[in-house]
Image: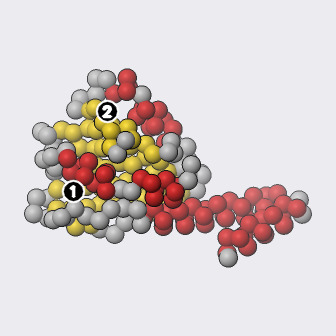
Amino acid sequence: DEISDIIERGKKLYQEGKYSEASSELQYAVSQIQNLQAEELKKLFPEPLPGWTAEEASASAAAMGLFGGGITASRTYKKEDTGESIEIQIITQSPLLQTVMMLLANPAMLAGQPDTKLVRVKGEKAVEKFSAKGKKGELSLILEGNTLITVKGRKITDKNVLHQYMEKIDFEVMKKTIGG
């Protein structure tokens, strides 16, 4: 296949001492593999809840120079009669996530944050932010130490919809897709 050919070309260039060209080929191979992973992530978004519609999922793989690299995928869900919307975003393999993950992993960092608490979703620790007054909320979860899943709601009156969407994501299949 194409990726194997690129890797072989990179290996040959390396063996010939053409390190710059070899590096370029291998970086290209990595970006192609990340594009494949991005496409796989798009398949992991759940179907809409009853009464909701979903837009097409989108995904992209950023080069290491852009925002530290990584893979991002998202899908938006809408409930037309109420104007409610949910966006599920998955970010994986990004060095920038380490800072976010440290904040989410440390309950002491959440102290003093209004409308914020630590909860569990399917056995995984998650951070829930919900403002009934502001009709918005967010549920963030770290999976496998390298992936951030966020469910954001706008114009929502019940935080349970955040949990319903998060619970519809198959974490076991996602773990296999993203690796560790």
Residue furthest toward the bottom? 1
Q: Residue at x 81, y 64 (%)?
A: 11
Q: Is residue 2 above or below residue 90?
A: below
Helix, strand or loop under label 2: strand
Q: Quadrant of residue 43?
A: bottom left
Viewer-nearest of discs 2 and 1: 2
Q: Residue at x 28, y 32 (%)?
A: 117
Instruction: State the quadrant of the N terminus.
Output: bottom right
Q: Which residue is mark 2?
A: 118
Residue 4 x %, y %: 71, 70
Amino acid type at circle 1 is Ser
Q: Which residue is mark 1?
A: 85
Q: Residue at x 30, y 36 (%)?
A: 119
Q: Residue at x 31, y 52 (%)?
A: 167
Residue 179 x %, y %: 56, 53
Q: Is residue 112 above or below residue 6?
A: above
Residue 140 x %, y %: 35, 43
Amino acid type at circle 2 is Leu
Residue 121 in sight in this render: yes
Helix, strand or loop under label 1: strand
Residue 154 in sight in this render: no
**Cα distance between the residues tagged 2 and 1:** 23 Å
Q: Quadrant of residue 55?
A: bottom left
Residue furthest toward the left? 81
Q: Residues within 10 Å of mark 2 (few under 14, many from 20)?
A: some
Checking the image for residue 153, the label placed there is none
Q: Is residue 107 left or right of residue 147?
A: left
